[in-house]
Image (cartoon, helix red, strand yellow):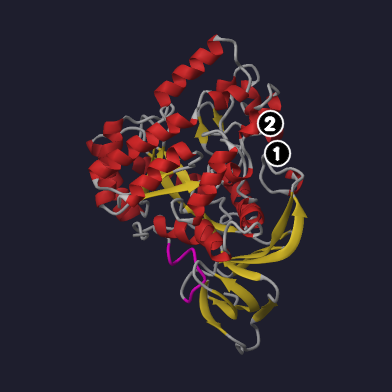
Amino acid sequence: MNTTLIRNGRVITATDDYVADVLMQDGIIHAIGKNMVVGEGVKVIDASGLYVLPGGVDTHVHLQNIIGPTVTCDTFASGTRAAAFGGTTTLVDFALQTAQDSPLEAIARAQRLADSQVNVDYSLHVIVTRVDAQVLADVRHAMRHEGVTSFKMFMAYPGVMMADDAAIFQMLRQVGADGGMVALHAENGTVIDLLIKEALEAGHASPRYHALTRPAILEGEATHRGIRLAELAEAQIYFVHVSSNQALKHIVTARAEGIPVFAETCPHYLLFDDSVYHSDEFEIAKYVMTPPLRTPDDQKHLWRALRYDDLQVIATDHCPFCMKEGHLGYQRQKMSGLHDFSKIPNGAPGIETRLTSLFDIGVMQGKLSLNRFVQLTSTTPAKLFGLFPKKGTIAVGSDADVVLFDPAATQVIHAEHLHSQCDYTLLEGRTLRGQVKKVFLRGELIVDGEQWLGREGMGRFVPRGTVQAF
C-alpha cells in the first residue's frame, strides 16, 4: 500500500491544534511529528497553509432509500462520491425493517445494495417499525454479531413507520442495557395527520402548508415524551434533526437532570428559516423537509445549544428528491405534490456541502471554534455511534481518513458543479469561505481538487461498537 507524508499542515482535532507532519501507511495514521524524515518512494504532500482534518462522519443520510411510494435520487455510488468531495469519509445510512422481515434481513438487504457501490466507508442504523420477542432477539444478535448498534424509530408517519410508545420503550430498555443507541424521530404523528387532513379539506394544498401542519409544539411534545420513556427505561437516547427550541428546551432540562440525552441538528436549520415558506409558489417544495424550517429565534437557540454541548452532532439528513420530474429517470419526486403538499417527498440534499457551509457560517462568523467544528462533524458522531477512535480523529493508529482543507479559498455553490444526482441545492449561488482540497480514505487519495480518484466498491462496511460518549 502507498505511504504518504502530509507535511507542515495545521492539524485540527476536537481537542488539538498544532502544525505537524502526518505519515499515513497501511491505511492508518502511522506517525505524527515535526520535520519527519522519510525514505524514497514515500509520496510527500506540502500542506502549508491548509488544515489537516479528520474525515467527516455523517451519521444521518438516506441513499437509495425507499420512502413511501418513491426512492431518494442518490444511489450509494453517487451519494458516497458526493460525500467524499465534501470531506465526509464515513457515513451511516438506514436499513428499513419491513412488515414482512426482520432487522437482520434488513441489514443483509442494505449491505447487498451498498457493498459494490460505496466510495467511502459506511455503516447502518436499522429502522425498526415492529417490535416483538423475535425482533428483540434479532436486535441483540445484530448488536453482538453484525456490528450494528443503533436503531431508529419514528413517532411520526402513522400507518407507515410510526411505532407506539410501548414498542419504543421496549427497544430503549434492551438496546440501552446492551450499550447501543435508539435514535428517535420526534413528532406527534397522529395530530400532524389530523392537521394535514383539515388543511386539505379547507383547500390548502400548496407546499407552505407542510410547515403549518407540523408546528414546533408537536416536535416538543414528542421529544418530551421520548425523554420520559428513556428515563423510565434507564437508557441513553438520541434525537435526530432537532429543529426547534420547543424540542431543545426538553433536551436541555433532561441533560441538566443527568439523563443521557443526545441530539443532532442539520445545516439547513442553521442556514435557513421559515421565511422561505411565505409564498404559495411550488418552488417552496425544495424546502419541504421534516421537521420543517423554523423561526430565526429557533436558530439562535440551536446555535447556543451547539456552543454549550446541548446539541452534540451536525448531520445532514441528506434525503434528496429532484424538483424536475423524470430527472435522470427518477419518478414520483417533488412534483408528486404539485396539487397536494402531503404528497411531496420530505427531504433535501446536503451531503456535499456540510463541512464548507458550517465552516462559513460557524467558524468564520465566530459561532464555533475550529475544535468544536471538528467535534460536531466528526469526533462526537464517531463516539456516539461506536466508530471512535477508528474514525473521527487524527491519531496514531486511527484510520487514515484525512481531509486537507483550505480556509482561505472561496467558492460559489451551484448544483451543476456538485456530485449528487439531485437537480438542486439549497445553497444555489451562495459564496462560501473554505474549500476541501484533498481527501484520503484509509490513506488512499480519492479527491484531488476537482479530480475524482476513487472507485465504486472501495468503501467498506464498518462494524460498530457501543456508545462511547459518557
Residue 273's disc number: none
Relative to 133, residue 214 above or below: above
Q: Is residue 190 magenta?
A: no
Seen at 42% across and 26% down, the residue is 189
Determine whether label 2 and label 1 are within 8 Å by CB: yes
Query: Which quadrant, please, contains the N terminus?
Result: bottom right
Percent position of residue 305, x then y: 48, 50
Q: Which residues are magenta?
A: 388-396
- Which residue is label 1 attached to? 424
Seen at 35% across and 31% down, the residue is 163
Name which residue type carries label 1. Tyr
Q: Which of these two is toward me, 59 or 455?
A: 59
Can residue 274 be seen here?
yes
Q: Is residue 392 magenta?
A: yes
Mark 2 nearby-residue class (10 Å; few <14, some 14–19, many ≥20): some
What secondary structure prevails in the magenta region? Answer: loop
Percent position of residue 446, x then y: 64, 63
- Separation (CA) of disc 2 from disc 1: 7 Å
Percent position of residue 295, x then y: 57, 36
Percent position of residue 453, x then y: 68, 62
Element type where label 1 sits in the image:
loop
Instruction: Mark 2 or mark 1: name the one nearer the start of the chain.
Output: 2
Residue 323's disc number: 2
Q: Quadrant of residue 401?
A: bottom right
Query: Which quadrant, please, contains the C terminus?
Result: bottom left
Q: Quadrant of residue 126?
A: top left
